[in-house]
Image (spheres, rainbow, N blue to C red):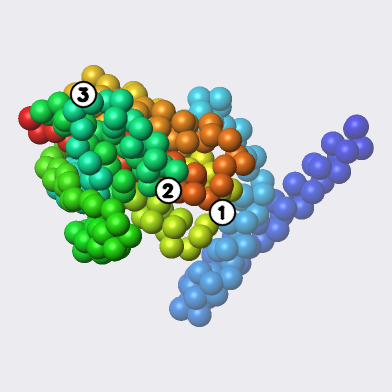
C-alpha cells in the first residue's frame, strides 16, 4: 500500500514539473506573435488536460442524481368520447303469393298442410280484420311474383298478390366508437335477414341445393343473430333498440324451429320449411316497423 502511495505521488510530481515547464515556455513565447499562436494552439490544450488529470472529479450528491433523472411522462387518461350516430332503416316493399283467404282456422290449416306437401310455405297470416290469409311464398319484386302466379295458374291453381309495404325509420345511437360500430352491425343484420332468407329460399329451389347446405346456412345466421341480440340486449333502455332485440329473439326462435326438424327431410319438405321461415321472419319484421313508426 505504501509503495502504491509513493508511486502515485511520484506520478503527480512528474505531472506538476511538466506543467511548470509548459507555463514557463508559454511565458517566454508569449512575447512574440509566433509564440502566442503556438501557446494558444498547442500548449494551452495540453495544460488543460494535465489540470483535469490532477483535479479529482467531484462525486455528485444523491439530490443531484435525483434531479438529473429522466422524468416519467404521464399520458392523460381522460374518458372515452361519447358520440351520437344516426342509422336509417329504409322503407321496403315485399310481394307475397296468397293462395286463399279464410275465416275458419280448421279449413285454413288443412289447405296449409296441402301446400307444404308441394314445397310451398303454407303460412297462415291473420290480418288486422281477423281474416286468415294462406301465403305460399314471398318475393322482393313484383315481377317475380307475377311470373310465379302465371306458372301456378297454368297448373290449375289460383293465387293473388298480397303485398307488405314497410315504412322506414331513423334511429339515434349513442355510445363510444367501438360500441356504435357493434350496434350498427347488429341493426344492419336485423334489417337484412328477411331479404337474405327470401333470396336463399328461391335459390334453394332454382339451384337444387342440398338439405345439409340449407341447415348449415341457417345455423350460420343463427350464430350471427345470437351475437347481435347479445349486443342489443345491453341497450334495452332505449325503446327502438329494445324493439329490435325482441324482433331478433323471434327470428332466433324461428330459425331454431327450422333446425330442430329431422335432418333426413327431403328437398320438398326443406323448401317448404325455408319458405315458411322466410315469411315468419318477414311478418315479424312488419310487426317491428309498424310498432316503431306508429
Mark 3 vs mark 1, foreground winner is 1
What residue is disc 1 on?
210
At x 67% / y 49%, what residue is drawn?
A: 53
Cβ atoms under marks 2 and 1 closer than 8 Å: no
Q: Which mark is residue 269?
A: none
* Observer able to see residue 100: yes
Q: Which of disc 1 and disc 2 is earlier in sequence?
A: 2
62 vs 153, left or right, is right
- Residue 289 placement: quadrant: top left
177 vs 91, left or right, is right
Between residues 49 and 180, which one lies in front from this camera angle? 180
Q: Quadrant of the C terminus?
A: top left
**Considering the numbered disc 3 on the image, is that residue within a helix, a strand or a loop?**
loop
Q: Which mark is residue 118?
A: 2
Q: Which mark is residue 238?
A: 3
Count of labels in the image: 3
* Observer able to see residue 178: no
Q: CA distance from mark 2 to mark 3?
A: 44 Å
Q: CA distance from mark 3 to mark 1?
A: 41 Å
As displayed, is residue 155 above or below residue 247?
Answer: below
- Residue 248 placement: quadrant: top left
127 vs 210, left or right, is left
Amino acid at each position: 500500500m505504501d509503495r502504491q502511495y509513493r508511486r502515485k505521488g511520484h506520478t503527480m510530481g512528474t505531472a506538476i514539473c511538466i506543467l511548470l515547464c509548459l507555463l514557463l515556455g508559454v511565458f517566454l513565447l508569449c512575447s512574440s506573435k509566433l509564440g502566442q499562436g503556438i501557446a494558444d494552439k498547442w500548449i494551452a490544450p495540453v495544460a488543460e488536460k494535465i489540470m483535469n488529470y490532477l483535479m479529482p472529479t467531484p462525486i455528485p450528491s444523491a439530490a443531484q442524481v435525483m434531479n438529473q433523472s429522466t422524468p416519467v411522462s404521464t399520458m392523460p387518461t381522460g374518458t372515452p368520447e361519447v358520440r351520437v350516430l344516426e342509422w336509417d332503416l329504409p322503407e321496403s316493399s315485399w310481394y307475397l303469393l296468397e293462395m286463399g283467404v279464410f275465416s275458419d282456422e280448421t279449413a285454413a290449416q288443412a289447405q296449409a298442410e296441402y301446400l307444404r306437401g308441394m314445397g310451398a310455405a303454407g303460412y297462415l297470416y291473420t290480418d288486422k280484420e281477423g281474416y286468415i290469409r294462406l301465403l305460399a311464398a314471398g318475393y322482393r319484386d313484383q315481377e317475380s311474383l307475377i311470373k310465379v302466379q302465371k306458372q301456378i295458374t297454368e297448373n290449375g291453381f289460383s293465387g293473388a298478390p298480397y303485398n307488405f309495404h314497410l315504412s322506414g325509420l331513423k334511429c339515434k345511437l349513442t355510445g363510444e366508437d367501438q360500441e356504435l360500430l357493434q350496434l350498427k352491425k347488429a341493426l344492419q343484420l336485423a334489417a337484412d335477414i328477411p331479404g337474405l332468407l327470401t333470396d336463399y329460399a328461391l335459390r334453394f329451389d332454382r339451384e337444387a341445393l342440398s338439405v345439409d347446405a340449407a341447415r348449415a346456412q341457417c345455423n350460420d345466421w343463427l350464430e350471427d343473430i345470437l351475437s347481435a341480440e347479445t349486443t342489443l340486449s345491453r341497450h334495452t333502455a332505449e325503446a327502438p333498440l329494445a324493439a329490435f332485440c325482441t324482433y331478433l329473439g323471434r327470428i332466433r326462435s324461428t330459425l331454431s324451429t327450422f333446425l330442430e326438424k329431422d335432418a333426413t327431410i327431403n328437398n320438398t319438405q326443406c323448401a317448404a320449411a325455408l319458405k315458411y321461415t322466410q315469411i315468419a321472419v318477414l311478418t315479424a319484421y312488419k310487426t317491428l316497423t309498424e310498432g316503431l313508426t306508429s
